Amino acid sequence: MAATHLPGTLPDPNYQPTYRSNGAGDDLAALVAPYSLSRVQLAEATGIADEATVNSWVEQCCPELAADAPAPLEPVLRYLDETYLPDPANWPGDNAYDEYILENIAARMLARVVANTFAADRSGDYRELLALVATLVLIARYWDGTDEAFLTLLNAEPTAQADEYLQEAIANTPESLRSLLAELLLPALREARGTFTADEARLLTGYALAAGYYAGEHPYETLNGIHVAFTADERTQPDTEQIRRVEDVLKANFRAAHEGAGATENPEPHYVTLPGDQDGYETAAHLIAALSQAHDVIAFSTQPGEGTSALADDRRAAFTLYLCYLMLGDDESSEERAAELYRTNRGK
């Protein structure tokens, strides 16, 4: 909640940020109820407290719990919603609370559980798993049905109501994305049904619901947290130098466009070129998570003699994952870029 003051005046020196629940506490508690995290993991997941503070939360809401036992997420989330966050003394500084702070905490909790659950078994292609999760997050953004129906989307036989809601969600997406969803993402979702245990299916759909439906903007941030956990031993993550280079190109293009405003010819923008292969598309996905406008300056190269379609078997999963990151962006340009890339490669 922002401080109330006239434009151009300083806020009241006695102003304290106020937490206001969005009324989703019970629904979020139900999503996290089956799970626990260590105190260190919980501190990392919540992002608002160190381990000592997390220990104090657990002592308050679970006084009988052993000091070294994993912390159950439901009572911790309820404690945050009902006791900790409403107390202004627990929020440093004078910045307003994020409107969806509790929802984002729940999504980060579940993202950590997903990473813990699936990172150990890398026998399959983790890119396909991530693309599936990203598809679920995207569907959740446009979901207008019940939580219970959404949680059955990975079941071998989802409820009839779930399929009806799914079709409504697809109809709610931008028209430019519908062919991509219908031809690329939804077939993969249907193929995945019944391939997970009941607990795994509930976890993946529960995370997607928290991140895509409840948490509001930036769902790719928690998705990228899972992505980073899965690729800890891979070389697909951009390093600091690569991120800085993308930042520099974005700034240079902005300056050139600003300085060239009104000129008869617009200056040619510069790009950061990545290989048009599995590693290149996956690196691009990470870059979007780090810099949401990175898609404006990313281009992909093709080696002589290579097929040019990003939908070829050896790069399809990583390309699909990149498209999902684009579609989960915060502006129409990234959605349009995803649709354009898909149309271009579908025709090759």
Image (cartoon, rainbow, N blue to C red):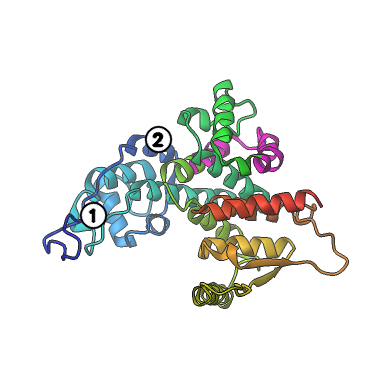
Instruction: Check disc 1 and report its element: helix, strand or loop.
Output: loop
Q: Please state which amino acid type lies under the numbered disc 1.
A: Ala
Q: At 24% from the left edge and 43% from the top edge, which residue is drawn? A: 82
Horizontally, is 330 left or right of 300 in the view? left
Q: Can you give x and y, in whole percent of width and height, for residue 276 in the image?
A: 74, 64
Q: At 28% from the left edge and 59% from the top edge, which residue is drawn? A: 53
Q: Please state which amino acid type lies under the numbered disc 2.
A: Ala
Horizontally, is 313 left or right of 215 in the view? right
Above or below, 307 relative to 207: below
From the viewer's side, name the closer residue of 59 and 134: 134
Prevalent SS, magenta region? helix
Asked if residue 125 can be seen in this view, the reply is: no
From the viewer's side, name the closer residue of 273 and 316: 273
Q: Can you give x and y, in whole percent of width and height, for residue 17 in the image?
A: 21, 55
Between the C-alphas of marks 2 and 1, the distance is: 30 Å
Quadrant in the picture for residue 333: bottom right
Residue sticking out furthest to the top:
160
Q: Which residue is mark 2?
A: 30
Q: Are marks 2 and 1 in contact (CB under 8 Å)?
A: no
Q: Which mark is residue 2?
A: 1
Q: Residues within 10 Å of mark 1 (few under 14, many from 20)?
A: few
From the viewer's side, name the closer residue of 101 and 118: 101
Total marks in image: 2
Report the span colored magenta: 179-207
Above or below, 241 relative to 278: below
Quadrant in the picture for residue 273: bottom right
Horizontally, is 115 left or right of 12 in the view? right
Q: At 62% from the left edge and 44% from the top edge, which residue is drawn? A: 176
